[in-house]
Image (spheres, rainbow, N blue to C red):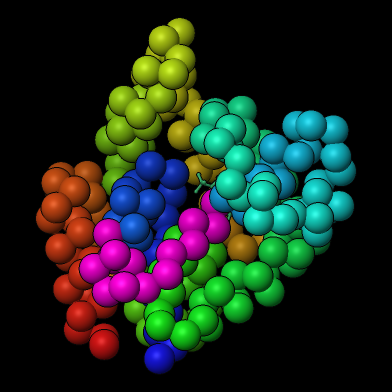
Amino acid sequence: MQFTVAIDGPAAAGKGTISKAVAAHFGFAHLDTGLLYRATGRRVLDGEAPIAAAQALTPADLARDDLRTAAVAEAASRVAVIPEVRAALVEFQRSFARREGGAVLDGRDIGTVICPEAEVKLFVTASAEVRAARRFAELKQADPSLSLAQVLADVRARDERDSSRAEAPLKPADDAILLDTSDLSIEDAVAKAVAAVEAAL
Ligand code: C5P
């Protein structure tokens, strides 16, 4: 059985948590496509040219445990504006989406560009303030010097870059279901996403 769930949205809206929970609920495979851009950004921070870095990615790059920092997120969103970088990552994502047994992919352009034929498309959002507060709670342990104001500024800058780029900008597909998680618990957000997939199975 091939069945694709496309989950897009801005940083820290809850995509990752929802995607993992939906995949676990239905026994589907899950790909966090942000990791592809983060791993490319990581290689660029280490001195490689962006397009060569994207073309050279291996599974070991995706397994690195230093991809979740603010510096790597920033580098990821910079390489993500380069059309040749995006092109280098398309086939891997499409073949993952077509794997037997169902797949959940989360990112920015899954429903619009990577898998326009996905059986279910969700666009997960939350206000910038709510997303910054969530990201701050995640990051402050590792980096006590971080301020909420700085995280909010970073979230807004990344939203702006992701939404305004010419190639595959962050936007809901016309047929996406919008899920605003600003006032939802994790359980309620997951339940709504599971119900949307259930309705399409
Ligand atoms: O989702 P995550 O924060 O890991 O993504 C890091 C960056 O990678 C995003 O800010 C965005 O610029 C880029 N990205 C993208 N397309 C995707 C996934 C991520 O452009 N499908």
Residue 100 or residue 10, whichever sits in front? 100
Residue 77 sits in quarter = top right
Q: Residue at x 76, y 40 (%)?
A: 43
Residue 173 sits in quarter = bottom left
Left or right: 128 as drawn, with respect to 198:
right
Q: Which of the image's four quarters has the C terminus? A: bottom left
Residue closest to the far top: 145
Q: Is residue 28 magenta?
A: yes
What segment carries the magenta color? 21-34
Q: Residue at x 14, y 46 (%)?
A: 185
Q: Position of residue 60 (x, y in %)?
A: 67, 49
Residue 94 sits in quarter = bottom right
**Placement of 173 over or under 200, stated as above or below:** above
Q: Position of residue 121 (x, y in %)?
A: 37, 73
Residue 63 or residue 140, whichever sits in front? 63
Q: Position of residue 152 (x, y in %)?
A: 41, 27
Q: Residue at x 34, y 47 (%)?
A: 13
Res. 50 visible in picture = yes
How many numbered marks have been drawn onto this rendered protein structure?
0
Q: Is residue 40 magenta?
A: no
Q: Residue at x 38, y 42 (%)?
A: 12
Q: Which of the image's four quarters has the N terminus? A: bottom left
Residue 74 or residue 176, whichever sits in front? 74
**Placement of 121 over or under 134, stated as above or below:** below
